[in-house]
């Protein structure tokens, strides 16, 4: 969703801000703007539309070396230039960019209005600019503290004062904010991808923290002015990770790099001798792991669907009940938290508000929660008691692909460890390890069949509406397949349990409404085949996602084969052709694949 960048240093700020905003485009936005401090105060330029339109609108001479920038996703007020950030005080002295929502903006606007302030936008953020400007305090950081004392809500903010042009003041409460430490220059961003070209040394602010950032230094402190002395940490992300390279789209790049990223994720985590996984980051002893009698998985959207797949894996390998639920529902239903349940929060971004709230609710009630998170240092990663980093590298395309595969692998590792402290034998543990070790090559084998899958995808793209069906292990795969397809092709795609088809949806089967059926080589193959043949018999068309050697009979001409791995791990691989089907359908339709309409990469609002 919204993105923040900031710069204080020796170089002209504008190109650095524009480049940073370009890196944040993938998060989804509808307008953008920057403010740069120069000898005659702040120059603020804002535009509705893309960052390149903002860049084209910048004055030729914009030499200031201190500035802030923002990409906005409209919440309060429509996407107009007046509502785009930065917002300024009436005299233009203060400029503010903000991610998040100020809950008491209405009351603050009314109060400021009564005091004679004229508003120039519909946003909640503008309130902050006026509050900072009207604070009686001297230093900008004290003014920002004063303003934030009056505010209820979530925020990451960056503030400039034309009369203190050596600094940017930033604050965080519920929305991520990072400082990048350079050589006599500092960067500010809501997301590391905006910084990685400049530095790998970063400081993550915590909720309730502020920082004053100058070219030479930064200081972190709390709202009651206690220094927190945060030191920088090194991030693993490189500039290449956020470049599109030779690929047409980030989604294509992220699909293609999975063999390599999965191999990287597994490095050092497999203990072949004892048939188990090494997951020190969980911070749980074997005795503690053994004491859990249930596992509850929480995530949103695709992360929730992979959570369903993870729950099945855990039930199969650990033989304890495991269940996944949408975090967005869980948090609203006063959930029962049990001491002998291991809660697992799963999230690519680590910033999804609904999942973060679920984590807090579990912790508030004394539950034990670990994270399966991709972004290092993100909110969910830091708030969980321990976790497994997914190490998929930055995922830029809005539609998640490689991070989901990594989540599947993460659940396999967790299931292996939990299984081996219970009744999973060494031999079975070693069997799963061998399967995981084959996974990168198996993914590469699916990707090698891309051209044929693209042909089937083009055919499917012509349909207005589709079914994705699967049962038991195949059902989460079908759910994720439908999700990916609808997200980027804008076609209606509905997932159904294959077993439930005959209880209603068969009525909808016709030639123009094709079905993608997950038919793995397992104990349910015959039943899955029988159901798919019922679809054919009613004039439907079926694309089968299957394993080599399965006799698909009349479905044979539209099959996609995935290498057979271990039966518990097969669903991870069965998701790969789903990614390619969705991607190539969207290519065939000529759509904006990396930035589908109405969607944002990380959903940081409720
Ligand atoms: C689908 C997709 C979303 C996310 C969901 C959770 O392609 O990207 O459904 O999976 O918004 O996001 P994270 O994993 O960041 O918590």
Image: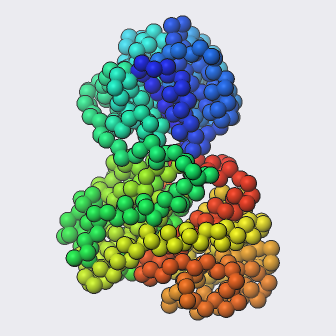
Is 420 situated above or below 167?
below
The answer to whether residue 351 shows anywhere in this view is yes
**Quadrant occupied by the N terminus:** top right
Specify the color scheme.
rainbow
> Which percent across, then down, holds residue 211?
35, 27
For image coordinates 42% across by 60% down, the residue present is 261
Horizontal side of 432 relative to 133 (left or right) equals left
> Which percent across, then down, holds residue 585?
69, 63
Residue found at the very far top of the displayed protein? 40
For image coordinates 64% across by 80% down, the residue present is 559
> Which percent across, then down, holds residue 352?
48, 50
Residue found at the very far front of the displayed protein? 246
Image quarter of residue 206: top left
Is 472 situated above or below 208?
below
Horizontal side of 426 relative to 101 (left or right) equals left
Is 88 situated above or below 22?
above
For image coordinates 31% across by 23% down, the residue present is 217
């Amino acid at each position: 969703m919204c993105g923040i960048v900031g710069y204080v240093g020796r170089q002209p700020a504008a190109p650095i801000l524009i480049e940073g905003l370009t890196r944040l485009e993938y998060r989804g936005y509808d307008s953008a703007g920057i403010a740069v401090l120069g000898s005659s105060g702040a120059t603020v330029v804002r535009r509705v539309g893309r960052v390149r339109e903002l860049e084209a609108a910048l004055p030729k001479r914009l030499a200031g070396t201190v500035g802030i920038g923002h990409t906005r996703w409209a919440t309060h007020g429509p996407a107009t230039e007046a509502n785009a950030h930065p917002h300024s005080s009436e005299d233009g002295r203060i400029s503010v960019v903000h991610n998040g929502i100020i809950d008491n903006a209405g009351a603050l606007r009314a109060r400021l209005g009564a005091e004679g302030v004229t508003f120039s936008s519909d946003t909640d953020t503008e309130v902050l600019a006026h509050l900072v400007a009207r604070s009686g305090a001297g230093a900008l950081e004290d003014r920002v503290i004063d303003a934030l004392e009056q505010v209820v809500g979530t925020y990451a903010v960056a503030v400039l004062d034309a009369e203190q042009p050596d600094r940017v003041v930033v604050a965080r409460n519920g929305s991520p904010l990072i400082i990048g430490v350079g050589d006599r220059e500092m960067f500010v961003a809501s997301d590391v991808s905006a910084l990685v070209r400049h530095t790998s040394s970063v400081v993550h602010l915590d909720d309730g923290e502020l920082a004053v950032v100058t070219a030479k230094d930064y200081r972190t402190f709390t709202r009651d002015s206690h220094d927190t002395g945060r030191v920088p940490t090194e991030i693993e992300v490189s500039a290449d990770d956020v470049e599109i390279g030779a690929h047409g789209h980030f989604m294509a790049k992220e699909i293609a790099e999975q063999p390599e990223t999965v191999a990287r994720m597994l490095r050092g985590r497999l203990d072949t001798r004892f048939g188990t996984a090494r997951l020190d980051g969980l911070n749980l002893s074997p005795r503690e792991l053994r004491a859990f009698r249930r596992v509850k998985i929480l995530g949103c959207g695709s992360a929730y669907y992979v959570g369903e797949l993870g729950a099945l894996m855990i039930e199969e390998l650990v033989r304890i009940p495991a269940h996944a639920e949408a975090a967005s529902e869980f948090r609203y239903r006063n959930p029962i938290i049990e001491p002998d349940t291991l809660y697992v929060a799963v999230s690519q971004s680590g910033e999804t508000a609904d999942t973060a709230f679920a984590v807090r609710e579990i912790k508030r009630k004394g539950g034990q929660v670990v994270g399966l998170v991709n972004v290092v240092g993100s909110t969910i990663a830091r708030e969980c008691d321990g976790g497994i980093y997914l190490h998929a590298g930055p995922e830029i395309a809005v539609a998640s692909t490689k991070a989901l595969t990594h989540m599947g692998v993460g659940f396999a590792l967790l299931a292996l460890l939990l299984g081996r402290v219970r009744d999973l034998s060494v031999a079975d543990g070693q069997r799963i390890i061998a399967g995981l070790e084959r996974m990168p090559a198996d993914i590469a084998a699916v990707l090698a069949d891309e051209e044929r899958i693209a042909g089937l995808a083009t055919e499917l793209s012509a349909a207005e509406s589709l079914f994705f069906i699967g049962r038991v292990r195949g059902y989460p795969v079908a759910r994720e397949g439908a999700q990916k397809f609808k997200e980027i092709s804008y076609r209606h795609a509905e997932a159904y349990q294959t077993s439930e088809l005959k209880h209603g949806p068969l009525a909808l089967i016709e030639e123009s409404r094709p079905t993608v059926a997950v038919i793995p080589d397992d104990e349910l193959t015959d039943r899955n085949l029988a159901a798919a043949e019922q679809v054919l018999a009613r004039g439907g068309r079926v694309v089968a996602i299957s394993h080599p050697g399965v006799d698909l009979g009349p479905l044979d001409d539209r099959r996609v084969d995935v290498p057979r791995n271990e039966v518990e791990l097969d669903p991870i691989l069965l998701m790969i052709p789903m990614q390619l089907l969705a991607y190539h359908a969207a290519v065939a339709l000529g759509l904006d694949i990396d930035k589908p309409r109405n969607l944002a990469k990380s959903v940081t609002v409720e």
